Amino acid sequence: MRLLTLLAVLLVAGIASAQKFDKQKLLEAQTFWDNKDWDWYKQNIPFFDCPDPDLVTTYYYRWELLTKHLTYGSPNGGYSFTEFIDRPFWSVAYGSISCPAGLQLYEARWLRDSWAARDYLRYWFKTAGAEPRRYSTWLADAAVAVDDVMPFWPSSIGTLLPDLVKNFEAWEKEHFDKDVGLFWQTGHDDGMEFNINSRQTQDIVRGAPAYRPTLNSYMYADALAIARIADRKGEGATADLYRKKAAALKDNVQKKLWDPKRQFFFPMAKRDEERDGFKVKAASLTYQTGQFAGNEHGRELIGYVPWQFNLPDPGYEAAWKPLMDTDGFLAPFGPTTVERKDPLFKISPTCCWWSGNSWPYATSQTLTAMANLLQNYKQDVVTKDDYIKLLTTYAKTHRKNGKPYIAEACNPDTGSWQGHDSFNHSEHYFHSNYIDLIITGLIGLRPQDDWKVHLHPLVPDSWDYFALVDVPFKNFTVSVYWDRTGNRYGLGKGMHVIYTSTHSFDRVKPVAVGRGGGTFFGTAPRSRTNFAVNNDGAYFPRVLASFTGQGSSTSKLIDGNYWYHVSPPNRWTCEGSPNKTDWCAIDFGVKRKINKVMLYVLDDGEKVTPPQKIRVEYWNGKDWKPVSLPYGGDALPEPRGREPYVIVFPTENTQKIRALLTHRDGSRSGLSEFEAWGEIHHSESDGNIEPAPMPAGNFAFNPDGKPFPKASASFTSRFDKVEFANDGKVNFAGSPNNRWTSYESPNASDWLEIDFGVKKTFRRVELAIYDDRGGVQAPASYDVQIWAGTAWQSVPKQKKSPEKPVGGQFNEVAFDAVTASKVRVVFTHPAKARSGVSEMFVWEE
């Protein structure tokens, strides 16, 4: 899923002279790489260099982390992002969650190809199953932030205005209290489960409704953003209305959520709450009433969120004193989410307690707020040295066993992630940001409405050098160099800002520079899509393979995600295959015009290694034919692991395409993703690409809840529904939930039955076997049985493919024609798990 710059980018004046800045050397200096696609990094990310190795390592790690969560959701919608490495049941379409969306968009806006950020913005309003208000977030503000970096061309950001207004109005309808003039939210739906306020209510996980600094700051920012977009679109009345909404929110946050005695912003209870005989009264701030009434503490990092959006007027800066105090929030791997001496301070060994642990989400917000304070306010409470100290602490917190890593939360005293990074879940967690903190905070590139480069660096005075190179900005690139001696980058002494021409300064200081002529490289209209991806539960496109290794699955090849590490896995492998050459094929169900294939090649260094050779073929209706190679002959390079193998060829109008992998001696091959790209018309890019329909003849199919065919089972998990087993939708990822499982069943075997209501003659059963690698796994075996009128009988001569059940892909069993009114599959469970399927098909042919 490489994001390719669609127009050539020429070197601007001054860049050519910076010959000592070697991007490849910077990449190879890091030893953590999972994704070694050097070309992608060089084409898409700004490069960063400075004297602090922890800041540098974490910077490149965070770009790699972004690639693990970058998701090509659908041929119509394009890119989105996941939060967890898996797709938990509370995530929405394609595994996204709205809670970190604002942070993710602030991060993705610095990619040179801006389609990732633009697609993700549209995702929240144009994709079925996306839920932009499931959690608190700031989507309108993020939309303007993206547009400030790379203006929406050719599609104006104004096209999103109706969606953003509708979203704001829905927040008002659902969460705004007109009498108070503030929005209410629970801690849980702020992404903050166990916290010091929720623990004073009956529901310590979700908490109770409160007027929180978080959501009200987000809505303030969104209101201002809507006003700015309306200005650009020439809708003055809308702009005036939303500026008034923002002003009212600002006034009420400062009047009602600020405690002048403790000099901090606090949540205010919406209603009376009682626990353990103590009452928290409505309209009281944290610890003004309840068990700890009058306590001098109660401060949480969320009290800094108003500065994340420059909400407070001057005069509230005293709130920042506890941040750099060890009795307050300061910790070796902090900051802590709550003051150290708070009566409810708690460092939890398990997730998700935000009563003391170090939380990257809140750390990101606090550092953004701190940079705003330093760059936009006059104050003497915190300094840029404090910012560097906290930023460096945050960078060093990104470690596990000495390697870059991040999960949900860590111990603020030890830096341990143990208990917060459960398997196949929150490893390499994308619920925070870091890159934006380097670019807008440390280096101080502050996008504004004009087309100037505004710099307000927060770098230490002691640094002899730093560089931020090839930052996409206003459809051009910006590079910033500081070289005290003039020997490191070859540009001479001083600070040099290259924005289509070179501007030099004798020292690091705030500056604003305009652009010269320069080279425009704006993003062209979408003209290509990946036709192979399938996250919408359709029967097509689907994957076929000659062999599937244990612990892998073919569905991972078309889920829109790729990464290369072994654990947690996202892969199809041929490990254990008896064949010298194996293949995997994409069946689109209808003909698609394909002219590029990208295969994301695995390399574990031992059992799974890059293939010796890859050949791509297309189906011409009768036979498999090799695609025409560029330059003719067998001219493609040898496949390399942990990067995509790209084959471009003249367009073929085909229903199927496949890759043949010739294995190296002593090992077998594998892929993380199989992409098949083709051109589309502009009308198709607006959401008109329809998947191929399911073939006729599936006797189990019942999408409308009719009496027959009816699905039933010996046991159905409380988390699932048996009717999902024949609704025609297939989802191997788990979110949104579309499966039947026997999870928690007391039985050693369970069955899933389809009752047709009348007798049917059929020859094949197909099972989309679900496997979450935990409580639900592929069965040890299964048996197809039919109702013979008085008893169940096994179908004779069952020919199963694959012979041993494999989870996360289609399994089928064929047999001679049988006639019956009911069919069932009896699953023998694996020892420590139970069985499940996303869909069961019964075919006439």
Image (spheres, rainbow, N blue to C red):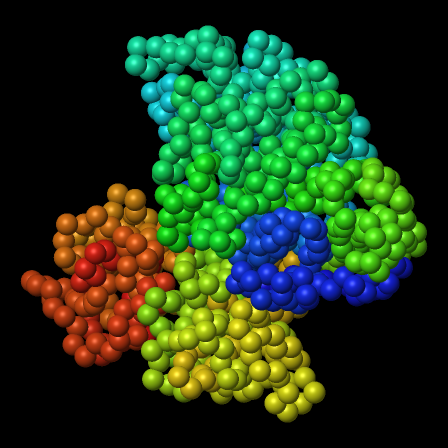
Q: Residue at x 37, y 43 (%)?
A: 419
Q: Residue furthest right?
A: 517
Residue 569 at what x, y percent from top left? 42, 62
Choose between 250 and 16: the one closer to the eye.
16
828 is higher (above) or lower (below) than 775: below
- Is residue 510 visible in the rendered image? The answer is yes
- Is residue 709 visible in the rendered image? The answer is no
126 is higher (above) or lower (below) than 137: below
Q: Residue at x 72, y 18 (%)?
A: 313
Residue 494 at what x, y percent from top left? 86, 48
Choose between 332 and 749: the one closer to the eye.
332
Residue 236 at what x, y percent from top left? 80, 28
Q: Residue at x 86, y 40 (%)?
A: 512
100 is higher (above) or lower (below) than 628: above
| Total marks in image | 0
Quarter in which the N terminus is drawn: bottom right
Query: With 292 as the anchor, is 158 left or right in this view?
Result: right
Q: Residue at x 45, y 73 (%)?
A: 605
625 is higher (above) or lower (below) than 307: below
Query: With 126 as the anchor, is 374 left or right in this view?
Result: right
Quarter in which the C terminus is drawn: bottom left
Q: Residue furthest left?
A: 790
